[in-house]
Image (spheres, rainbow, N blue to C red):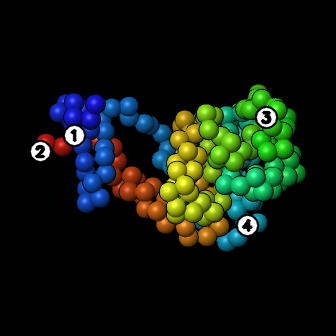
Amino acid sequence: DVPTLVNRRCLWHEGPRQVWRMAIARREGALPSISVHAGDNEELTAVVSRVQTLIIEESVRPQDILLLCPTNERARQYGVALRRAAILGVDSVHVTDTERDARLCRPGHLTISTVHSSKGLDAYFVLIASANEFPTTVEGRASFYVGCTRAIEYLEVFATRSDNLVPEIRDSFSYFEQHPQPDQAPDT
C-alpha cells in the first residue's frame, strides 16, 4: 500500500509538479522518445525507416515490435507502407483490423494494431504513430496510456503536429530525461 511504501522511502512526491517517484522496480534502458514530422508522408517514412533499422541493424525480431495507431485507417496505411518496404526478415505484416482471426505477434510477423485492439498485448518494442490524433479528452488520454503500457523495454512515439496530447507527451518525456530516477527517496 502507498503509506507503507512512503514510510520505507520507496515512494515519494518530487518537484514542483509533485510527480510520484519510486525506488523499486527500476527500469533501465532507453527513455521513451517522441518525434514530430512535417506531415503524414514524412511520419510514415520515419516509422518505416525506424522499423527497418530495428530489424536490420539492431537485430530485433519482427514479432517483438508492435506498431500502434489511433485508428484502423492509420493502421491500414502503415500496413501498406510496411508491406511495400519488403523488409528483410519480415515474413508478413499483420494488421489486426483486416486479419482479425490471425494470432498476433507470430514469429517473423510484424503486428500493426489500433491501441484499442492492443489491450492485453505487450511487446519489447512499441512504436506509436500519429500521436497528435489522440484527443485531450479523458478517453484520449486513457487510450494513449494503454498504448504506452504495451511497451516492455522501448517506446517511441511519432506525430505529425504538435497539438492535442503531443505537448504533454513531450513535457513528460523531457521531465524524466532531466530528472533521472534516484536509487532512494531524498532525506526529508
- In this figure, which residue is indicated by the disc labeled 2? 188
Q: Are marks 3 and 2 in contact (CB under 8 Å)?
A: no
Crowding near the residue tagged with mark 3, few <14, some 14–19, many ≥20 C-alpha atoms within 10 Å: many
Report x, y in % for residue 16.
25, 60
Crowding near the residue tagged with mark 2, few <14, some 14–19, many ≥20 C-alpha atoms within 10 Å: few
Residue type indicated by callout 1: Ala
Q: Is residue 43 toward the left or the right of residue 3 in the image?
A: right
**Gap in angstroms between the C-alphas marked 4 and 1:** 43 Å
**Gap in angstroms between the C-alphas marked 1 and 2:** 9 Å
Q: Are marks 1 and 2 in contact (CB under 8 Å)?
A: yes
| Quadrant position of the N terminus in the picture | top left
Report x, y in % for residue 50.
69, 51
- In this figure, which residue is indicated by the disc labeled 1? 185
Report x, y in % for residue 3.
21, 34
Residue type indicated by callout 3: His
Q: Are marks 4 and 1 in contact (CB under 8 Å)?
A: no
Q: Sequence order check: which comes first, mark 3 or mark 2?
A: 3
Residue depicted at 67% across the width and 72% down the height:
38
Q: Sequence order check: which comes first, mark 4 or mark 3?
A: 4
Residue depicted at 33% across the width and 32% down the height:
24
Question: Element under label 2?
Answer: loop
Crowding near the residue tagged with mark 4, few <14, some 14–19, many ≥20 C-alpha atoms within 10 Å: some
**Gap in angstroms between the C-alphas marked 2 and 4:** 49 Å
**Gap in angstroms between the C-alphas marked 3 and 1:** 43 Å
Q: Sequence order check: which comes first, mark 2 or mark 4?
A: 4
Question: Element under label 3?
Answer: strand
Quadrant position of residue 44: bottom right
Q: Are marks 4 and 3 in contact (CB under 8 Å)?
A: no
- In this figure, which residue is indicated by the disc labeled 3? 109
Tell me, for residue 40, which label it has, or none.
4
